[in-house]
Amino acid sequence: MYTKTESGSNSILWSTWQQVVMTEVPDAATAAVKKKISKQKSILLLNVAGEDAIYLASTFGLSDEDVDNYHKLGEAFDNNAVPKRN
């Protein structure tokens, strides 16, 4: 089951992941290609991060379509992993 790690470590792991994977799709790519790449990134994230991430993602209340959208899934992980600032 999912357990919170030490304060800030989720944030560091998430920041590192974003640096590695968050390469932009060229503007010339079609909408279908962009959607496919987004889905592949989502699948990669959930597979690499493991069962805890899959469980955590299931608690975000995202639709199946939103889980396949890397930016929406990433936003949900951002909201969970990155500490809020006042």
Image: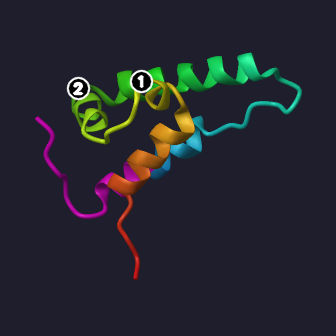
Furthest residue toward bottom = 86
Local crowd at mark 2 within 10 Å, few (<14), some, or many (≥20)?
A: few
Q: Which residue is mark 2?
A: 51
* Quarter of the rendering occupied by the N terminus: top left
Element under disc 1: helix
| Residue 27 picture location, percent across and down | 85, 33
CB contact under 8 Å: marks 2 and 1: no
Residue at figure coordinates x 37%, y 21% from the top left:
47
Q: Amino acid at mark 1?
A: Asp
Which one is in front, 70 or 52? 70
Q: Which residues are magenta?
A: 1-14
**Is-magenta flag for residue 24?**
no
Local crowd at mark 1 within 10 Å, few (<14), some, or many (≥20)?
A: few
Residue at figure coordinates x 40%, y 77% from the top left:
85
Q: Amino acid at mark 2?
A: Glu
Q: Is residue 59 above or below residue 14?
A: above
Q: CA distance from mark 2 to mark 1?
A: 17 Å
Element under disc 2: helix
| Residue 46 picture location, percent across and down | 37, 26
> Mark on residue 74?
none
Image quarter for residue 31? top right
**Along the polypeptide, which appears first: circle 2 or circle 1?**
2
Left of 45 or right of it: where is 2?
Answer: left
Which one is in front, 16 or 62? 62
| Residue 53 picture location, percent across and down | 29, 34
Residue at figure coordinates x 17%, y 52% from the top left:
4
Image quarter for residue 12? bottom left
Closer to us: mark 2 or mark 1? 1
Left of 18 or right of it: where is 29?
Answer: right
Q: Which residue is mark 1?
A: 64
Q: Is residue 35 above or below residue 73?
A: above
